[in-house]
Image (cartoon, rainbow, N blue to C red):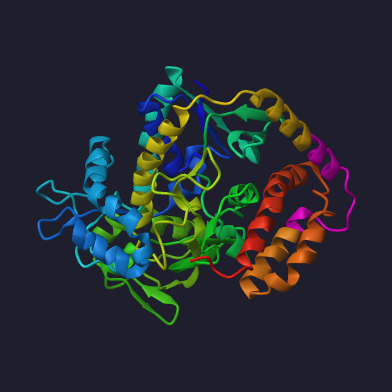
Amino acid sequence: MTPALVVGEGIAGQATALALVAAGVPVVLLAREPAAQAESTHRHDGIDAALGEDDTPGRHLDDLLAVAGEQARPFLEPLTEAAPGIVEWLARLDVPFERTRRGELSRSKLAGSSRARSVHAGSATALHLSRRLSALLGRHEAAGRLERHAGWALIDLVLDDRGQARGVVAQCFATGEIRAFEASAVCLATGGHTGLFMHDTFAPGGLGGATGLAVRHGARLVAPNRVSTHPFCYRAGGFVRRLPRRLEALGAELGAGLLDLSRVDRAPLRRAAGPALEAHRQATGTDAYSEPVVVSSAPDRTLGGLEISVDHATAVPGVFAVGGVVGAYFGQATLEGLPLAAALHGATRASVGIARFCEAPAPAGATLLLAEARKRAELAQAEVMERKGSETVLDVVRDLRAAVARGTLMQGLAELKARSRKARLGDDLACANAALRTWWDLEPALDLAERMTAPEDA
C-alpha cells in the first residue's frame, strides 16, 4: 500500500500518524522541525474533560458552544463525549498529571467553564504528551511501519488531472535536496497562520504556507481573519512569550498591564507554573514571584482555517487536515482547554477518514506527475537564487505582517505580490538559507492573504 503522508510533527501530526499506524496504514511523517521544536509542544494549555461527578459531556458541550457558536456543534459534540477517554489514555501513557492527595486527577476551573474540568501536567502538559507520542512513533519507526523525515519544508501538493492528491514536493534543510513523496493521502498538521498577525515580532506561529497551498488547489476556508489573543504575554529577545492562562485561576490579579502574583500561594504556583515563571526570569531578569509582570495581549492562535468535513477531509480529494490548520472546532472563540483535546480527537477522526480513502485503488501515473512537480520546484528555486533585487524576502514578510495588523492588506496586496516576485533571498549563505525556507511559504501565504481580504466565510 502506498503510504499516507502526514505533514507536521506537532501534537496533531504525531497523534494522527499513530492512529494511522494502528489502523494498518503505512505512514510517512514529514516535518519542518522535530517534535521537540514544534510550536504546539511548548504551549501551556491543559485538557478539558467532564471528569467530575457534578459534570457531564453535555455540560461541557454547552460551555463550548456558548463561546464557539452552534456551527461548531458537529465537531464539539463527539469531542466532549470522547474527552474523558482521551484523558484516561494519556494517564495510561504516564503523562504526569497533577493529582490530589488521594491520587485523583486535580482539576482546575478556568474562565468560561461552569465546572472544574481542566487537567494539567504543570505548565508543560503538551511537552510531556509530545515526548510520549514521540517514543511510540520511534517504536513504529524501528519496526518499519513509519518513516520520519524532520527538517523538510513543504513546497507543493501534487494533484492529478482529476484533482486528487498524489503526494507532495518538499526540500531538505540540511542538504538542499528537493524530493517528491508519493502518498495515497496527505494530512496537513501544519498549525495555524498566527504568524501573519505578528507584525512586530518573529514569534512562533507560521505564515500559513501550507494552508495557502491547499487553498491554491481548491480547499475552502472558514473565517481566516479570526484570531484569539492571549492576555498574559511579555516581550523578551524579540519574541512574544506567554505565561499560562491558568495563573488567573490560581489567583493572579491583572490590572493596568501588570500581572500580580504576590497574593498567590507559592506552593501550588510553583507546581502549576514554575517552569514558565523561571523561563520569564531567565528572559527578563526579573522575579515574577516578587515583582509584577508587565504583560499585554497578543495574537495567540487563529480560530479559522481550512474547512473540513467531520472526518477531517478538505474539499481537495485525498487532502485531510488536523490541529491548528483547521477552523472547525473554535468558531467565534475558544476556551483554553479545547485546542489540545481537539488535536487529539481530530487525529482519531482523520485517521478513520484517511484509512477509508486509502482502501480505494490508487490511480496510475503518479511517478511522472511527481517528477514534473519536482522539476518545477527546482526551476523556481534556481530563479529566486539568481535575483539581485533591492529588498529581501524577509522585507516583504515584514510588510505583509504589518499590513495585516494595520488592516490595510486589501489596499497593498497587489504591491506585495509584485515585490515578492522580485525579492532576493539575502546577502550571505546563512540568511539565504533561512530566507529560502520563508520564500517557499511566502507565495502561498500571499494566496491565503488574498482570501483574507474577501468577506468572512463564516
In the figure, is residue 280 to the left or right of 264? Answer: right
The residue under the point 45% across, 60% down is 281
The image quarter containing residue 57 is bottom left
Of 7 and 287, which appears nearest the observer?
A: 7
The verdict on residue 72 being magenta is no
Q: Is residue 176 at least partly visible in the picture?
A: no
Q: Position of residue 110 (x, y in %)?
A: 27, 65
Q: Residue furthest bottom?
A: 256
Q: Position of residue 69 (x, y in %)?
A: 36, 67
Magenta stretch: helix, strand or loop mostly: helix
In the figure, is residue 212 to the left or right of 379? Answer: left
In the figure, is residue 265 to the left or right of 370? Answer: left
The residue under the point 63% across, 62% down is 451
Q: Residue furthest top?
A: 143
Q: Position of residue 308 (x, y in %)?
A: 46, 50
35 in relation to 329, above or below: above
Q: Is residue 240 at least partly visible in the picture?
A: yes
Looking at the rendered structure, the number of numbered marks drawn on it comes to 0
122 in relation to 281, above or below: above
Residue stretch rendered in magenta on the structure: 378-395
Q: Position of residue 404 (x, y in %)?
A: 64, 68
In the figure, is residue 186 to the left or right of 269? Answer: right
The verdict on residue 394 being magenta is yes
The image quarter containing residue 408 is bottom right
Q: Residue furthest right?
A: 388
Of 11 and 358, which appears nearest the observer?
A: 358
The residue under the point 41% across, 40% down is 350
The residue under the point 63% across, 50% down is 209
89 in relation to 175, above or below: below
The image quarter containing residue 332 is bottom left
